Image (cartoon, rainbow, N blue to C red):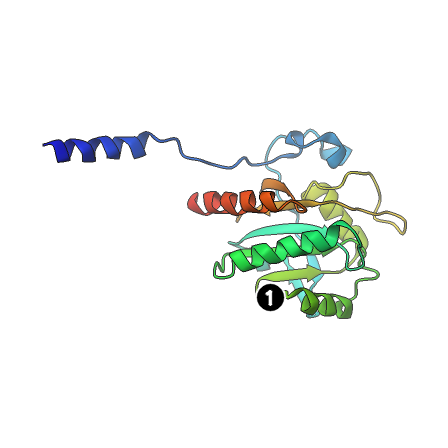
Amino acid sequence: MCFFSIIVITSFYFILQPKVSLPIYSPSMVAEELVEEDIRYVKKYHVINNFSLTNQNGKLITQEFYENKIYVADFFFTTCPDICPIMTENMGYLQKKLKNQTDILLVSFSVTPELDSVDKLRVYADLKGVDDSKWNLFTGDKKDIYELARKSFLVAKNDGDGGKYDMIHTENFVLVDKEKRIRGFYDGTDTKQMDQLLNDIKILKNSY
């Protein structure tokens, strides 16, 4: 009887435990300086816009590649001397930790695509130990990439038009779910934040 009571109490404990979930970010939830004015007050239904960009292997990749996938995205450039090497190292850490999880991918968008050609991305990928099956480094049209940063991923700290003198420099990592929604922002230069990100990925996976 006592044993039965323990089972019942334990069962009720797990049933009554609140389910942990991650927020679904909309532009209205993000600091104003990170959001383009025309979408600043959007409160729901925000998703990452479709894109078509070229990876380190010269392959054209679209949003369809990430269908039913969770992914972590950042914005970098290969010649960056300060935060980007740390961010790339932390992306490498995520790659190692998520190696066997085929439904979790990594994405890095170059913010100097006019300089980061496919060949340069290939050299960089080899130097940094990028697993091509796990992690895409993207180059392409600068205006397209900058619009993604400002209007989709919500990470740009300054206004601009994606022109010649426009420059985005952000340390943010962005967690995107299978429905193309933003579920978290993380400081890509902070190793503790990477562990928080890994924990949040577990929470997100458990929600499916």
Within the image, what quadrant is residue 63 found in?
bottom right
Can residue 63 be seen from the camera position used here?
A: no
Residue 136 in the image, given as x and y percentages of width and height:
64, 61
Residue with the most extreme left position: 1
Q: Say which quarter of the image contains residue 41.
A: top right
Q: Total number of numbered labels?
A: 1
Q: Secondary structure at mark 1?
A: loop
Q: Which residue is mark 1?
A: 131
Which residue is outermost to the right?
A: 165
Residue at x 19% of width, y 33% of height: 6
On the image, which quarter does residue 91 sit in?
bottom right
Q: Nearer the viewer, residue 8 or 147?
A: 8
Residue 32 lies, in percent from the top left, at: 73, 30
Confirm whether residue 26 shows in the render: yes
Quarter of the picture holding the N terminus:
top left
Q: Residue at x 75, y 49 (%)?
A: 83
In this rendering, position of residue 201 left or right of residue 156: left
Between 162 and 78, the residue placed more toward the observer is: 78
Residue 140 shown left or right of residue 74 in the figure: right
In the rendered image, the vertical position of residue 172 relative to residue 67, given as above or below: above
- Mark 1, Cα crowd under 10 Å, few <14 / some 14-19 / many 20+, is some
Can you say whether 111 is above or below 35 in the image?
below
Which x, y percent locates residue 132? Answer: 61, 67
| Percent x, y of residue 49 | 66, 47
Residue for point 75% across, 68% down:
118
Q: Amino acid at mark 1?
A: Asp
Q: Residue at x 29, y 31 (%)?
A: 13
